Amino acid sequence: MPKLIRLYIVNVLIGYAIAAAFVAMLLWFNVANLWHLVSHSSSGLLAVFILWFANGIVFAGVQFGIAVMRLKDDDDHHGGRRDPIRVDMTRMVPVRSEAKARNTRSPR
């Protein structure tokens, strides 16, 4: 399996695991009376699944984005101050260029 595909799958699984922990904490701490709504409704499991799935999409995307941004090549520069560009004024040569004639007609 290509390394990029493996990286994507692993990070999506991590994102969905984080989403599962997040939804579990929402239910455990009864945020916005969520546990009561889920436990006393006939479609409570469906609501929990949709909440987990939607949060999983977000967390998986963020997790994969972080993983991609942390990738680096061996020839990466690590920022910092660069050497200033030095211009040798004695070697500068003037270059002539002709300006094109302006259009004298006004646009309608």
Image (spheres, grey):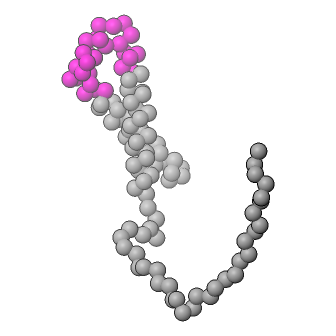
Quadrant where the C terminus is found in the figure: top right
Q: Would you place residue 86 above or below residue 29 in this image? A: below
Q: Would you place residue 29 above or below residue 95 in this image? A: above
Q: Would you place residue 57 above or below residue 73 in this image? A: above
Q: Residue at x 24, y 21 (%)?
A: 31
Q: Position of residue 28 (x, y in %)?
A: 22, 23
Q: Most extreme residue toward the bottom, as rendered?
A: 90
Q: Residue at x 22, y 19 (%)?
A: 30
- Residues 85 and 4: in front is 85
Q: Quadrant of the rendered structure where residue 21 is?
A: top left
Question: Residue 37 colored magenta?
Answer: yes
Question: Residue 45 colored magenta?
Answer: yes
- Residues 36 and 5: in front is 36
Is residue 10 among what the camera can see? no
Query: Bounds of the magenta span?
Result: 23-49
Q: Position of residue 33 (x, y in %)?
A: 24, 15
- Residues 29 and 98: in front is 98
Q: Residue at x 70, y 81 (%)?
A: 96
Q: Position of residue 105 (x, y in %)?
A: 79, 54
Is residue 91 among what the camera can see? yes
Q: Is residue 4 left or right of residue 42?
A: right
